[in-house]
Image (tube, rainbow, N blue to C red):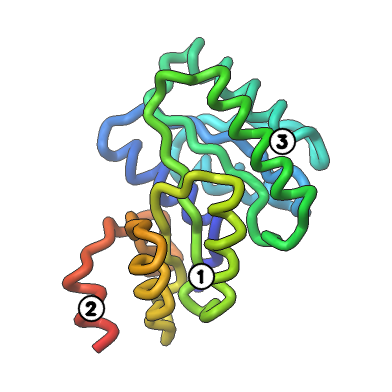
Amino acid sequence: MEFGKTTSIGKIANRLQKDGKKVMVAAADTFRAAAVEQLEIWAKRANCDIIKKEENADPASVVFEAIKKAKENNIDVLICDTAGRLHNKKYLMDELEKIQRVIEKELPEADKESLLVIDATTGQNAIEQVKAFKEVSNITGLVLTKLDGTAKGGVVVGIVHENKIPVKFIGVGEQVDDMEVFNSRDFTQAII
């Protein structure tokens, strides 16, 4: 079964690489045990570069370094893996705000996406996650994961309706290619 945020980053990076983009990932989820190592595995699967520091390093400094390297190496897409599961932890949300300030300062002209990964099995807790993340980030899209099992992800319907945030991708399996662009017709048929 597919896991979540870091797995989704690897799959999106893979998809972008296959589309001819030069992709780099930044391992800025430095507080979760083994997050950096997990992203390293997915970066290797996606055949893209990774910028990382030691566990518990300042996440914003990882993003700063990644932006610097991305500019030096003419990277098309930089994907930053940030702490995110514990939306009720103020220090993690503060770190997310700090990362966003670094990105705005260093890449003011860049097109930016802020994707929130939602586990299809989460249910009503996903509503609280979206609310908390909207307070610190301009969420531009959702990634719905774990649609390879019995979960239908129906909670996303209310989230999209209430928050006007589109679903961009869905995770449908364990492999690096198991990330699809969201199709509302297919999704609706699957729920029904």
**Image vertical order of residue 186 relative to residue 15, above or below:** below
Residue at image coords 55%, 56%: 5
User: Does residue 192 appear to the left or right of 83 in the view shown?
Assistant: left
Residue at image coords 52%, 30%: 49
**Rendered image quadrant of residue 75:** top left
Residue at image coords 35%, 74%: 157
Pointer 1 residue: 119
Query: Number of labelled discs?
Result: 3
User: Does residue 73 appear to the left or right of 98 in the view shown?
Assistant: left
Type of amino acid at the residue the image marks with label 2: Thr
Mark 1 is surrounded, within 10 Å at the Cα level, by few (under 14), some (14 to 19) or many (20 or more) other residues, namely: many
Q: CA distance from mark 2 to mark 3?
A: 38 Å
SS of the residue under disc 2: helix
Residue 64 location in percent, x, y? 64, 23
Type of amino acid at the residue the image marks with label 3: Pro
Label 2 with label 3: CB-CB less than 8 Å = no
Residue 10 is at least partly visible in this image:
no
Q: Earlier in the sequence, mark 1 or mark 2?
A: 1
Q: Earlier in the sequence, mark 3 or mark 1?
A: 3
- Give the label on residue 188, or none: 2
**Rendered image quadrant of residue 53:** top right
Q: Which of 6/166 is in front?
A: 166
Label 3 with label 1: CB-CB less than 8 Å = no
Q: CA distance from mark 1 to mark 2?
A: 17 Å
